[in-house]
Image (cartoon, grey):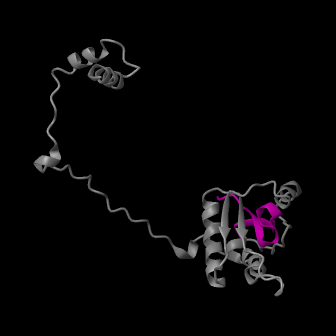
Amino acid sequence: MKNRNRKDRNRKTQSPLLKPGDEELFLSAMEDVKRQSDPRKQGHYSQPPASKNILPRKIDVSKSPTLMRPQKKITPLAAGRSIDLDRRTLERLRRGHLRPEARLDLHGMTQDQAYSSLMSFIEASQACGKRCVIVITGRGRTMDGGGILRKKTPGWLNSPTIRSRVLAFATAKPRDGGVGALYVLLRRAR
């Protein structure tokens, strides 16, 4: 029984990738190698490199793109319509052929929370180079004629700070939330 255990142990320690003699060759190559002492035991810690105090440069808020007034008059958008977009791309957006690259769910938010979330989401998505995003508003209560966020979101998308970033928006297909969601096509970041 003891012989059998030794054979099993030998099988476990030898790698199938090692050839006979590889271990001896490795040990002979490592004969003159000395183990380094552990610097943590001696109390010699290497200090991390001194970090440069990098502060973002001051930005003139009056020239910030989100606060700048657009040069030309911006026409308000209606769901499924656009002035600055070719018909084929608009049709692809309406039919849900442009797959959303990011998603924002406004369920359970107050109007103020939803508006600020929408603003920062649109800004961040455009900065990341995303073209099509989906905003889920929820359907709301059908007795009331639909939810308040569902009614307010198209108006928010037409607000000057957001409209300058949006090319078009359209009601989502049922697989993506139907009337409780909007596809939003963003302008390319400049």
Tell me where the magenta segment starts and ends, as one range: 164-190
Could you say which quadrant of the image residue 100 lies in?
A: bottom right
- When the figure is inspected, residue 170 is found, relative to residue 144, above or below; the finding is above
Position of residue 66 in the picture relative to residue 186 (left or right): left
Who is closer to the viewer here, 8 or 46? 8
Who is closer to the viewer here, 181 or 168? 181
Q: Residue at x 65, y 73 (%)?
A: 118
Q: Quadrant of the C terminus?
A: bottom right
Q: Quadrant of the N terminus?
A: top left
Who is closer to the viewer here, 107 or 13? 13
Seen as rendered, the residue at the extreme front is: 1
Q: Position of residue 24 (x, y in %)?
A: 25, 15
Q: Position of residue 69 (x, y in %)?
A: 67, 75
Q: Residue at x 80, y 75 (%)?
A: 76
Could you say which quadrant of the image residue 86 lies in?
A: bottom right
Seen as rendered, the residue at the extreme top is: 21
Q: Residue at x 84, y 66 (%)?
A: 82
Residue 129 can be seen, yes or no = yes
Residue 67 can be seen, yes or no = no
Seen as rendered, the residue at the extreme left is: 42
How many numbered circles does the render carry? 0
- When the figure is inspected, residue 80 is found, relative to residue 144, above or below; the finding is above
Position of residue 88 in the picture relative to residue 100 (left or right): right
Query: Is residue 144 magenta-colored?
Result: no
Q: Position of residue 133 (x, y in %)?
A: 70, 62
Could you say which quadrant of the image residue 95 lies in?
A: bottom right
Position of residue 11 in the picture relative to residue 155 (left or right): left
Q: Position of residue 165 (x, y in %)?
A: 70, 67
Query: Is residue 189 magenta-colored?
Result: yes
